């Protein structure tokens, strides 16, 4: 049995047992979707959002594309990780950074390091070119901006939940100025001594044949296990009718996360249900965050569906590591 390292006991996290007729490594919550535009005023869509355990409850940072179709970040809280109270207004920062305006925000990840919660999201520079924004909070009340991590064009910032070799580590997905070209979207490693200056960039993974052939990008904060860092990521395939987004998994070296030990050949989750097939962007499952109970190894995956709603899917650390090893590229 794989052991979760530096994890939390979360006995009240969302969970459903695998259905008797399901032989897949990941299975969906029967009451999906759990969030939609109805949960925020003046919302067009609510999706691609991040959830963490906080003092026995749960806190979240949510992507809402408003009715003006500008995406912003919203805060929410929950006692069970399923039913949420989300603020009706996008949150504001306690500080400003000269020369770095906040013009929009989407696809947040929240990462706890030593009791502080870091928010990483896709933000716009002065000319709206996308890059990775950063902020922190200690209480999910006051949120303080930090310097943007990288230059445009960059997305899918995924921070690791502890220092590695005395450095902070982040994955990102540099891309071109447009939607992307085949083979353009790869996952890169970067490290920093202070979360301000990032360097030592290294390639981690590139697109591969099949469901991840067009581009790939990081997903939830990696889960540390005694067999390596368990990373869930997304992959994109281009078809004659547009793109399809899938989810996969990889196992990375604990001391050097740029080293991939195993990587799934087969996807772990695909757009299959109606709420994943039809929306603002059809055929999308986009994993953003996980809750992982260190005691049982249970994992709840929060994912955006069709760029429109939020769903939950379930697996376990043991099942996902076993699947990744047995179905590796």
Image (spheres, rainbow, N blue to C red):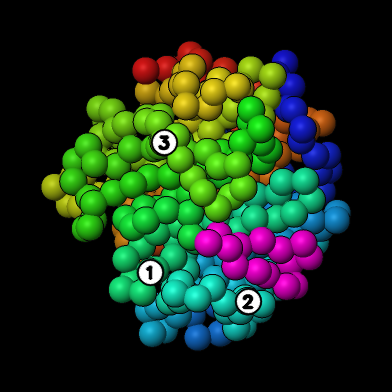
Q: CA distance from mark 3 to mark 2?
A: 29 Å
**Residue 40: x and y, percent?**
57, 79
Camera-nearest residue between 101 and 320: 101
Question: In the rendered structure, which segment of residues is drawn in magenta?
Answer: 134-147
Regarding residue 319, the answer to whether it shows in the image is: no
In three-dimensional space, the C-alpha distance between marks 1 and 2, rounded to whole angstroms, equals 17 Å
Q: Which residue is mark 2?
A: 95
Kindly state the secondary structure of the residue where label 2 is placed.
loop
Question: Dot 3 corresponds to which residue?
Answer: 201
Alpha-carbon span between mark 3 and mark 1: 21 Å
Looking at the rendered image, the quarter that the C terminus falls into is top left
Q: Which residue is mark 1?
A: 125
**Mark 1–mark 2 contact, CB under 8 Å?**
no
User: What is the quadrant of residue 33 in the picture?
Assistant: bottom right
Q: Position of residue 85 (x, y in %)?
A: 71, 73
Residue at 86% x, 54% y is 56
Check if mark 3's residue and mark 2's residue have beta carbons within 8 Å.
no
Kindly identify the residue that appears in the image at 66 percent across and 77 percent down. 94
Would you say 235 lies left or right of 233 here?
A: left
x and y percentages locating residue 295 in the rendered image: 82, 31
Q: Residue at x 36, y 74 (%)?
A: 126
Q: Nearer the viewer, residue 3 or 99?
A: 99
Q: Give the SS element for disc 3.
A: strand
Q: Earlier in the sequence, mark 1 or mark 2?
A: 2
């Amino acid at each position: 049995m794989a052991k979760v390292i530096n994890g939390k006991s979360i006995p009240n996290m969302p969970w459903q047992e695998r259905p008797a007729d399901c032989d897949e490594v990941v299975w969906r919550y029967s009451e999906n979707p759990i969030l939609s535009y109805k949960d925020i005023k003046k919302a067009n869509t609510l999706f691609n959002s991040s959830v963490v355990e906080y003092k026995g409850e749960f806190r979240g940072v949510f992507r809402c594309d408003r009715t003006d179709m500008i995406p912003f970040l919203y805060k929410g809280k929950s006692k069970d990780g399923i039913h949420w109270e989300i603020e009706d207004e996008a949150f504001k920062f306690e500080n400003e950074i000269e020369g770095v305006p906040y013009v929009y925000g989407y696809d947040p990840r929240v990462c706890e390091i030593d009791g502080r919660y870091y928010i990483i999201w896709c933000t716009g520079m002065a000319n709206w070119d996308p890059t990775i924004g950063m902020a922190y909070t200690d209480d999910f009340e006051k949120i303080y901006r930090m310097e943007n991590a990288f230059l445009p064009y960059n997305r899918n910032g995924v921070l690791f939940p502890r220092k590695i070799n005395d450095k902070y580590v982040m994955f990102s997905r540099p891309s071109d100025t447009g939607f992307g070209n085949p083979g353009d979207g790869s996952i890169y490693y970067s490290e920093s001594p202070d979360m301000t200056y990032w360097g030592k960039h290294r390639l981690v993974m590139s697109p591969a044949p099949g469901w991840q052939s067009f581009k790939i990008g990081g997903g939830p904060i990696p889960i540390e296990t005694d067999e390596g860092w368990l990373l869930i990521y997304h992959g994109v395939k281009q078809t004659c009718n547009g793109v399809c987004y899938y989810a996969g998994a990889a196992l990375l070296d604990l001391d050097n996360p740029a080293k991939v030990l195993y990587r799934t050949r087969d996807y772990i989750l695909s757009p299959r249900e109606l709420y994943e097939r039809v929306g603002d962007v059809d055929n999308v499952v986009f994993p953003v965050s996980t809750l992982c109970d260190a005691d049982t190894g249970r994992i709840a995956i929060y994912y955006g569906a069709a760029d429109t709603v939020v769903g939950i899917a379930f697996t376990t650390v043991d099942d996902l590591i076993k699947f990744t090893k047995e179905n590796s590229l």
